[in-house]
Each structure stands twice: as C-alpha cells, then as structure tokens.
C-alpha cells in the first residue's frame, strides 16, 4: 500500500511557475523521525529537472533584474507576510519531517520570513559610488550588478531558514534562483514555494527541484547558466564543490562544518551559563552548524557548572515534536542516531564518563531518539573533540588561564562559531579579538539573526549570509570609466 500523503499542499517540484513531477515519475518517501513511518512522498528527479529549472531561471532573469529595487522588494515583503500567515502550517510540516519540537519549527519559520523582510529593505541601500578622477574630462562610476542565475543547496537541519538566507538576498539582488532542499526535508520548502506561487512572483524567477544531491549538483557545476552556488553542509562536500567548480570558476558561498567552543570564566553567573549552554547545545539535538561542541569551564567553577548542566539536561522533555511541552525531538535518521552512539562509545573507550544520557531512551519503541548527554573526563584526542558531532553530546573540560583556553579553543580546523561566558569586559574583548571564528557569542549561545553576517573562517567556509554582507555574494562590482567630449 502506498504511503498516505498529507491532506494539504503539494509534493511536486516548481519550475517556471508550474508544479511539475519528475519526467520518469520518480518519487521519494519522507519519513517522520519520531515514528519511523513514511507519511508522504515527493517528486524526485534528476539532472534534466535541474537543467530545465536553470533554463527557466535564465529566461526570467533579464526582466527580474530590470525591476527597480523597490519593485523586487515588494515581492519579498509579500513572501514574508505569506510565510507568517501560514506559520503554523509550515511549522507542522517541518516538525513532521525534521523531528524538531513545534515551538522550534514556528521560531524557524518566522526567522525565515525575517530574511525576506530584511532583504526587501536592504536592497534599497545597495549603493554604488562615484570616485574622483585624476584626469580632466573623465568620470568614474562603480555600480553593482547581479551575479546571475544561482543554485541554492541546503541540509536537513533548518529546512526553512537556510534556504531563506540564500533565496532572499539572491532575489533582492536581481538574481533568479534554483533551490534544492535536503532529501529528508523537502516538504517545508515546498510550503514556502506555495507562498511564492500565491504571491505571483514572475514565472521562472524562483524554482524548486528535488533529486539526488550528486546528480543535481553536477548539473549546477557544469551548466554555464549557473553562475553561483550557495551551499550549506559538510566541509567534505564543500571541498568537493570547490574542486569541481574550478573548471568553470563557478562562484561559491560555502557555509560548512563547525566545532564551537564554549568558554566559561569564573566571574560568570554559573547557573545562567549552564542553562544557556544546555539550550545552545541541545537545540535541534545538536544538529546545528553553530551548535556548541566543546565546553571549557574554569577550574574554580567547573564542578558547579558541570552539576548545573547535568541538572538542566536531565530536565529537558524529550518526545514527539508535535506533543505539548516537548523540548527535544528525535535525531533526523538512523545513521545520525548510530553516529551519536559511536561518538559516546569512542569517548568511553578513552576514559570519559557519562554523567547523564549516553543511550537511546528505553521508553521509546520507535523513533530516532538519543538522550541529551553530558560527558566528563574528556581528552582532546577523542573523536567528539575533533569531528563535528552534530549530536546531543556535551563534553565538559576545565582550564586555568586565558591564554591556555584561547589556544585550546583555536586548536581546530573549523572556525564557524564560538561562545564566551563572562562579565569581565577586558576578557570579553580579548576573546573576541583572539578567537579564530566567524561568529562569537558573548553570553549568547543563539546569535543568528537576519541583520547580522553569518559565516566562518578556516575550513568552515567563506562568504557570509545575513546582514549587509549577505548581498555581496549575489552582486558583481562593475567599473564604468566615462570620457567626456
């Protein structure tokens, strides 16, 4: 028997203003990670679908680019308003396919709408400039030009927000878009494209395709229509895109893996720091690129901080994200669950101690659940300290001096986010200046917002999403030299 699909909404791709299925009838099952049940199927195509979408975007872009910034902004405002009007519906779908608690899904939907609102306003300030010429009779103009058709690729963990961070600035800049969501969580983006369809965005300006990542990426990389790829995902895949894109010098924005340290100084409010750490760590089960991954507490407060963290972690309510009061849902799939088990097992084999969690909760017969876990006696050689965990595991270590902890925090190939808990302004400034990370949260473990740049250093990628800087990746700089008669 075929799985029952949702009673509302579509499950098709969106190309050139039409809802279309894959030419070969390909479909992919969508699994609820809380129940392990297939609850929907979506259209699932190949390279020909990506090619058709790129061609539609190419044909639509000249007219879209020619609109004034105010004209494009009006459409973005409508998308933001439409998403807010359908927030509960979009959030429910997100919880069904991603497993996150409904409250988190609502917050993400509204944050995604904020991206469209922000860029509706910011594009009106994408100024060029006039430079003084050194010769008589010459004028120098610097103007900004949309980069071209863009492909946007995102992972499962934030199916609305991560695409909104890409689509909104691209549309604002005058680019046409082809979006590819994660295979596990396409329904959320389909709901957003229903909004795009309803508000009457010109045909072909925004397109949605679904299919195997390798197949669609190959089309994006080799088709000359595609001028830019914006990718959020693993560092390994980001490196492969960079290698493959070199043949055409495809412009890339890469928001890749992270391994964020949290540093708690002795002057911090220990209870507040522990609570903020637990909220940041276990949000979306740690399946967050900027999720805190290593926790360094000063030796004078490490015992108190550890005890408070364990208490807060144990108090989290775990279950189906649709149930009232649930704070922690399931992992996205069985592979993620098994990796969490492996990370804990590797730590235990090296002498670590589980203070709470560390296993699949026995009360759940179904679902990819893993208990919020706190570890002590952790060594830097353990996998949990070197690899991006993407799991609800909180390893706690101690430090003595500022210079020591800076060195430990920076001892990673990643450079996306870091966090510092202190009331000492001197320590805060020294940490902000010394930590090699693109995002630094001072007493804040949830720093992402539409108006600020988001991105990393080192092997966490390059380019920024959000804020004024978020437009830069979608605009070229053109220099016009005019000789007067």
Image (tube, rainbow, N blue to C red):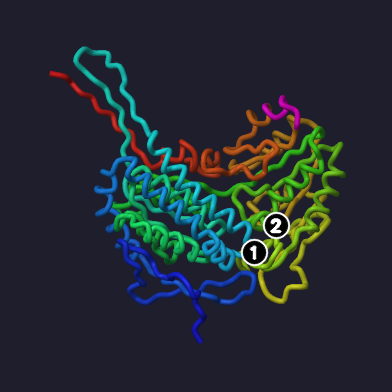
Q: Secondary structure at mark 2?
A: loop
Q: Residue at x 64, y 61 (%)?
A: 101
> What is the crowding at mark 1: few (fewer than 14 residues within 10 Å), some, or many (at least 20)?
many
The structure residue drawn at horizontal position 64% and vertical position 34%, both measured from the top left corner, is 435
Measure how far apart labels 1 and 2 are at the Cα level: 9 Å
Give the x, y percent position of residue 434. Answer: 65, 30
Residue 287's spot in the image, x, y percent? Answer: 62, 56
User: Residue at position x 46%, y 63% from top?
Assistant: 191
Seen in the picture, residue 137 relative to 141 is either above or below; the reply is: above
Main secondary structure along the magenta-highlighted residues: helix
The residue that disc 1 covers is: 331
- Horizontal placement of 228 versus 448: left or right? left
Q: Tell me, yes or no, whether the two marked residues, 1 and 2, touch with CB atoms within 8 Å.
A: yes
Q: Count all numbered tags in the image, as a single digit.
A: 2
Task: Identify the mark nearer the N-term, 1 or 2.
Answer: 1
Asked whether 428 falls inside the magenta stretch, the response is: yes
Q: Quadrant of the C terminus?
A: top left
Is 399 in the magenta?
no
User: Could you say whether the residue bearing mark 1 is in a helix, strand or loop?
Assistant: loop
Whether residue 337 sits left or right of residue 49 in the image: it is: right
- Start and end of the magenta stretch? 423-429
Q: Is residue 445 above or below residue 157?
A: above
Residue in the foreground of this view, choosing between 365 and 127: 127
């Amino acid at each position: 028997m075929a799985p029952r699909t949702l009673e509302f909404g579509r499950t098709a791709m969106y190309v050139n203003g039409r809802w279309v299925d894959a030419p070969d009838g390909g479909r992919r099952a969508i699994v609820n990670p809380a129940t392990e049940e297939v609850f929907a199927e979506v259209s699932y195509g190949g390279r020909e679908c990506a090619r058709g979408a790129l061609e539609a975007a190419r044909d639509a872009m000249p007219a879209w680019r020619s609109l004034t910034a105010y004209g494009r902004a009006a459409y973005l405002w409508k998308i933001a308003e439409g998403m807010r009007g359908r927030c509960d519906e979009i959030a429910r779908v997100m919880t069904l396919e991603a497993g996150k608690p409904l409250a988190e899904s609502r917050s993400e939907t509204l944050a995604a709408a904020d991206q469209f609102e922000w860029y509706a306003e910011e594009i009106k300030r994408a100024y060029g400039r006039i430079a003084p010429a050194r010769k008589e009779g010459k004028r120098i103009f610097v103007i900004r030009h949309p980069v071209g058709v863009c492909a946007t690729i995102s992972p499962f963990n934030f199916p609305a927000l991560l695409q909104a961070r890409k689509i909104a600035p691209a549309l604002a800049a005058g680019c046409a878009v082809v979006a590819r969501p994660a295979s596990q969580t396409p329904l959320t983006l389909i709901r957003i494209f229903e909004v795009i369809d309803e508000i009457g965005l010109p045909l072909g300006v925004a397109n949605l395709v679904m299919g195997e990542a390798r197949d669609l990426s190959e089309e994006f990389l080799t088709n000359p229509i595609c001028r830019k790829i914006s990718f959020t995902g693993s560092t390994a895949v980001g490196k492969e895109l960079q290698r493959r894109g070199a043949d055409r010098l495809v412009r890339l924005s890469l928001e890749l893996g992270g391994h964020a340290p949290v540093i708690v100084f002795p002057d911090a409010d220990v209870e507040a720091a522990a609570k903020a750490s637990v909220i940041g760590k276990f949000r979306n089960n740690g399946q967050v690129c900027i999720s805190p991954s290593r926790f360094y507490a000063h030796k004078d407060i490490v015992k108190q901080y550890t005890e408070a963290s364990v208490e807060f972690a144990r108090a989290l309510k775990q279950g189906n994200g649709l149930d009232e009061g649930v704070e922690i849902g399931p992992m996205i799939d069985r592979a993620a669950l098994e990796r969490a088990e492996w990370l804990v097992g590797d730590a235990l084999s090296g002498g670590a101690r589980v203070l709470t969690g560390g296993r699949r909760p026995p009360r759940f017969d179904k679902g990819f659940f893993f208990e919020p876990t706190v570890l002590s006696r952790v060594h830097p050689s353990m996998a949990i300290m070197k690899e991006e965990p993407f799991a609800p595991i909180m390893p706690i270590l101690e430090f003595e001096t500022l210079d020591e902890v800076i060195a430990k925090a920076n001892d990673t190939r990643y450079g996306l986010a870091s966090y510092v808990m202190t009331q000492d302004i001197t320590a805060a400034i020294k940490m902000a200046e010394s930590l090699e990370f693109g995002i630094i949260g001072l007493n804040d473990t949830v720093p992402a917002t539409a108006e600020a740049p988001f991105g990393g250093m080192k092997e966490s990628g390059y380019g920024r999403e959000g804020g004024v800087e978020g437009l830069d990746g979608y605009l070229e700089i053109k220099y016009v030299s005019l000789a007067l008669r």
